[in-house]
Image (cartoon, grey):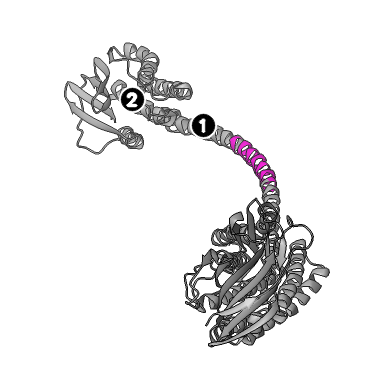
Amino acid sequence: MIVLLSALSWAANAQDSPLKLTHARANITVNGVTTTQDLQLPYHWDRYNKGQQGEAVFELRFDLPDLPDDPWSLYLPRLGNAYEIWLNGTLLQRQGDLRHYNGADYARVPRYVVISPGLLQNSNLIRVHVRADIGRRGGLSPLVVGPQEEVYDAYIWNYHWRGTGSLVVGAFSLVIGLMALSLWATQTDLTRPGRPRRDPLYLFAGLAELLFTVGVSDTLIENPPLLWPWWGVLQVVVVGAWSCSMTLFCVEVAGWHHRPSARWLRRWLGVLMGGSVVLALWALGGGQPLALTSFYALMAATTLGFSIVFLWSATQKALLPHRVVAAALLINFLVGLRDFYLFRINPTYAENTLMRYSSVLFGVALGYIVIARFRTASAQARDLLATMAYRVSEKEAELAESYRKLEILARDQERTAERARILRDMHDGVGSHISSAIRQLQSGRACNAEVLLTLRDSLDQLKLSIDAINLPPGDVTALLANLRYRLEPRFAASDIELQWGVEMLEPVARLDAQAMRQLQFMVFEALSNVLQHAQASRLRIEAVRTPRGTQLRLIDNGHGFDVTTPFRKGLQSMRERAQAIGAILSLHSEPGRTSVEILIL
């Protein structure tokens, strides 16, 4: 049944000034029963018809002494949930289905209707037919009618405040929430033992901001994705979860998360969130608004108690982030009390909640915390880099000093090793030959020529030991030339023809100074054997580069020897030196031809 309402409102002094229509005659239908009454707008359905749905028709009259030539407009700060607007029997605007309860909700933002001058009369009747659902703030606010430009200014200001402002706040909260969650997902504490720990401060802040985005977006959603009352229950749960998340965020800011009281607080908040679903469904679906008021009262009491402790702590020796969040919490708590009074204790109709705007301060506080932590981390990183640079410079100086000492030690060791080598070579070469000469003289059986030969070998060995100091590494040609220079006079004195078949060979890279000395003594031993034992008249020295490596051969035409018999001391020394430098020693001997071959791989 359609309820008829009528009201009379007239212009004050000037016809070109907007008229505010507040007196109406209303026909209100609840549960099939219609009542007619004169009333003063605004009419808040949930206040006068608690827990009930229905519909109403409001009639508002106004007179115009002179009809305007320019377009007029009608501004309605709030009405709905679905509605029709008529002027003098002409439908101006319709939104939603008046017969379908719990459908789309068009009471979220203010409405604006342009009125053609031809529709206005000296005596005018505006009829507004609304459908009101349970708990959805249905009803009708005072109407403003007048010249288009002036009415539009009032409308657009209210629309920006309620609609555009909600959009901006929702976008801001979405960005802050995603930023906080990304910080929570990427920033881990690796200094503590066990698994890497993420900072729950960013988690609770991110959840709170995303939940707030969902809550604020309700203002802009006329066709919710869920049916009523489930959409309303979701909004109640979102508001409760936002409040709980912000409380836990404050716990993390204050550093109280390890306290036993914090564990009890988390449990109590969990109980409140579990009860929010039941109480919201009871209030919005069962028509018991007191249940929802009770939930908000419990949440407000919890927030009040926590806020008092948090604010008191902030006045003590708290860090600056704690105080910044405390200031945001205090402002939001005062605004929340204002909204709780206006919307739950003494419900008004056309008022806008301020909580959606004051809550932006939490996002600002989070941004400050992130910036402060970044600056602290940057300062610590700079200090760490400076400390590391200082320590590196110290270590570099220490290493330079160590390298200097090691270089000195290495040079000392090199000189010591060189002296030891010279002494060893003199002992094995010169010393051995001098000892042999002494034994020859002591025996009395050796002739002067034999003793002289032994002493000459000793002298040649000494000269070669001195030559080995400056022997170029890997230069086999220079090594053989040096031996030829030292020993050729002895070969000539012994009537041994020396034939030279040595090519200009590239240096052998792997023959260092030590290996060159080993090779020198091998060749010297072979030449000495020819001089002392071969009784040869001709000796040929060859050195060529083969595919396998560098090959040295010493060939004489002496009487030879049996290569199968155990080697004498000199030949055994040659074999050991060949193994030391990775060379292959081959001996071939028969009367008239003896060949000593050294292959350097």
Q: Which mark is residue 523?
A: 2
Q: Which residues are magenta?
A: 386-407
Residue 309, image x, y percentages: 77, 76
**Front-most of 586 and 141?**
141
Q: Nearer the viewer, residue 498 or 149?
A: 149
Question: Residue at horizontal 47%, vertical 73%?
Answer: 226
Label 2 CA crowd tier, 10 Å (few <14, some 14–19, many 20+): many
The residue where tag 1 is placed is 418
Give the quadrant of the C terminus.
top left
Labels 1, 2: front one: 1
Residue 91 x, y percent position in the rendering: 53, 65
Q: Left or right: where does residue 217 sit relative to residue 382?
A: left
Q: Is residue 562 above or below residue 153?
A: above
The secondary structure making up most of the magenta span is: helix
Residue 367 in view, yes or no: yes
Tag 1 secondary structure = helix
Looking at the picture, does residue 224 appear above or below residue 158?
A: below
